[in-house]
Image (cartoon, rainbow, N blue to C red):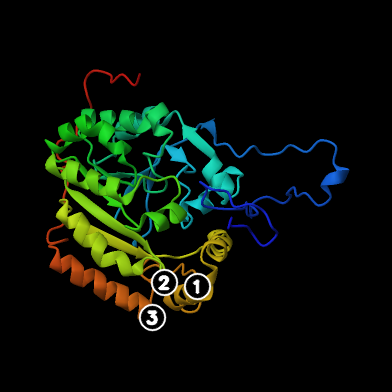
Amino acid sequence: MENRGINGEEYLNGRGAQLNTANKFLKNSLSKENIEGIDDWEVDNGKTTFIEGKSKSIVNKVESPDVNMLYSLNPYQGCEHGCIYCYARNSHEYWGFSAGLDFERKIIVKQDAPKLFKEFLEKKSWQAQPITISGNTDCYQPCERKYKLTRQLLEIALAYRQPIFMITKNALILRDLDILQEMTKYNLISVFVSITSLQESLRQKLEPRTTTAKQRLKVIEQLSKSNIPMGVMCAPMIPGLNNHEMPAILKASADQGAVAAGYTVVRLNGAISQIFKDWLSRNFPDRFDKVWHMIQDCHNGNVNDSRFGTRMRGEGNYAQLMSKTFKLHCKLNNLNINSIQLNGHLFKIPQQQLSLF
């Protein structure tokens, strides 16, 4: 039976969000109340569109103590992957879009990212601290095949000997293995692969346009064989849906060469609460109440917690159980024995201007 919403609308296969939530920054919005009285109503065809955007800067300092990064760089705003839980959805509202379907279908391509990155690295005050590519949206989402912004950024990082951390859930990263291999010669690169579920049926619902878990494990294996320090992110763990998979994800990743691991507990901040609630009621109506209440149990009765120190790990019985499970299975699989340290001492500004084209 086809999955339909409460108003009878068809389920949008291949999309995570099934609706566009209101943008809190916009005073006005459009809605179809009496469609028969409208002569000319522009209907969204549902296709992904790409918008060339310009930015004043491309590298952002990360203020949160809960994430293991100092600076982040994101060549794309919005993400085709459509992960229903993605915390980056809310940031799409700053651009005048919805955190729902707009986040997946209206992708801003920062064409000037390579130029801005080069300018940033040439600042006299820059001290070559590691920069994380994909701190917000995935730099290897499908449109990277066409725009190749991530590859250009890696070429610049290699030329300047700038250390880079990366996180992705797309096997497209293997396209850039040649650059990554060069970077690892100077200890300039480490990659984390995000794996939320090993169950293909659940992955398709949670992350409809991502590569399979099998392919992500292949990424870990191939990059590890090239001596690139690899890690896995079990993120987010959703009690009642995928939290029971954490031990298997950690073991499978370690078996393929991962040496580090991390995890987060799902938190539904801002518009994500409404988007996820709608998605959960459509896809798992039989356990909606159980999952929703378990998420609330992790955040002191709410589905979100903005407090530093607890927002990414949660609190309460379920959160404590996940924390103990993570520590135990990291120990069993020899993960996180040593922290990954990249080399920033080789940083230099090339004498010849680097071509970005």
CA distance for labels 2 and 1: 8 Å
Q: Residues within 10 Å of mark 2 (few under 14, many from 20)?
A: some
Mark whose residue sits in front, 2 or 3: 2
Image quadrant holding the C terminus, namely top left
Three-letter residue code for mark 1:
Arg
Q: Which residue is mark 2?
A: 240
Horizontal side of residue 222 vs 41, given as left or right: left
* Residue 222 spot, x, y in % from top left: 18, 41
In this view, 38 is above or below 328: above
Query: From the viewer's perspective, is the residue at label 3 or at label 1 nearer?
Result: 1
Identify the residue position indicated by label 3 in the image.
316
Mark number displayed over residue 287: 1
Of labels 2 and 1, the one closer to you: 1
Which is more toward the observer, 132 or 212? 212
Give x and y (percent) for residue 240: 41, 72
Looking at the image, the residue that sits furthest to the right is 37
Q: At which x and y percent is residue 138?
A: 39, 44
Q: Amino acid at mark 2?
A: Gly
**Residue under the image location 22 percent in, 40 percent down:** 163
262 above or below 151?
below
Q: Secondary structure at mark 3?
A: loop
- Whether residues under marks 2 and 1 lie with C-beta atoms below 8 angstroms apart, the answer is yes
Q: Earlier in the sequence, mark 2 or mark 3?
A: 2
